[in-house]
Amino acid sequence: MPHDLEDRALPRWGGAHFLVFRNLRVHTGGNPWTMAMYSIFEPILYLLAIGVGIGRLVGDVDGVNVSYAAFVAPGLLATAVMNSALHETMEGAFVKFTHERYYRAILSTPVSLTGIVAGEVAWAVLRGFVTAIGFLLVIVVFGLVSWPDALVAAAGTLLVAFAFGSAGLAVTTRIRAWSDFQYVQLVLLPMFLFATTFYPVTVYPRAVQVVVELLPLYHAIQLLRGCALGGLGPGVLVSVAYLLAMGALGLVVARRRWARVMLH
């Protein structure tokens, strides 16, 4: 392995913005709202079918004093942001590394390995944020969230995208074939169903609540639900700390793992 490639494994952030610009151009042709249209289609269907449809049977959620649709909307928002960020740092990164040999080509430029990692995570954050803006516009029009609360929730989605984008990029170094992504789905689908997306954590026995409260999507939902419904309390600070720690740890692990993968 050339020495200059090893030098590029040193912790430098140079060139991260070039990856963001490149990804934006390739994915959208310069129009970021194309991403939002594709990313919010599925959660809007869930919102209409479950939040609005079943919500007419459920009524208001006990202890929250909001309609069922308004309760479900932040959970679907968190899920949409999570999926958008993970798509870029998992499937997208896997294709770039295994099929396109994109990262090795980039290392022949002034962009450092740390710049690649930072750039891909920054791109995942942007992708998640654009998805969030599109979804928030919809639920504001539906009257489920007010404009001021939607702006606060939009800020919260940056942290959610950072946490899951960093974690996804770290996990991708363990993926060896497309079939391995089925194991990722085995984690994501139960988490989506049980991490309070559709009902409060209080419906579970206390032993189950403890397990649910350890899930990253639970904390993403708690953060965005608190922002969107005006319920910013001490519990939200716990979720902020959880997601910050998750994102920082994911970034460090991703940097080390990609250095090992790229230099061998």
Image (cartoon, grey):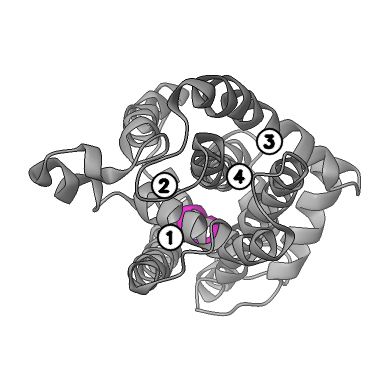
What is the CA distance from the residue labelled 4 to the residue labelled 3? 12 Å
Label 4 and label 2: CA atoms lie apart by 14 Å
Task: State the residue at coordinates (53%, 61%).
Answer: 162
Q: The disc labelled 3 sits on which kind of residue?
A: Ser
Residue matched to label 2: 173
- Distance (Cα) linking label 3 and label 1: 25 Å
Earlier in the chain: of badge 2 and badge 1, it is 2
Give the mark nearest the N terminus, 3 or 1: 3
Question: Gap in Å between the C-alphas at discs 4 and 1?
Answer: 14 Å
Q: Which sits earlier in the primary sequence, circle 4 or circle 2?
A: 4
Closer to the observer: label 3 or label 2? 3
Q: Classify mark 2: helix, strand or loop.
A: loop
Secondary-structure class at tag 4 = helix
Q: Secondary structure at mark 1?
A: helix
Mark 4 vs 3, N-terminal side: 3
Q: Is residue 44 left or right of residue 3?
A: right
The kind of residue on which mark 4 rests is Glu
Q: Secondary structure at mark 3?
A: helix
Q: Nearer the viewer, mark 4 or mark 3?
A: 3
Q: Would you say the residues marked 3 and 1 are in contact, meaning their CB atoms lie under 8 Å apart?
A: no
Circles 2 and 1: CB distance less than 8 Å? yes
Tell me which numbered mark, 4 or 1, is placed earlier along the sequence. 4
- Across and down, in percent, residue 10 comes to 50, 78
Label 1 neighbourhood size at 10 Å, few (<14), some (14-19), many (20+)? many
Q: Which residues are magenta?
A: 161-165
Q: Which residue is mark 1?
A: 254
Q: Does residue 192 appear to the left or right of 118 in the view shown?
A: left
- State the residue position of label 3: 39
* Residue 112 shows in the view: yes
- Picture quadrant where residue 77 is located: top right
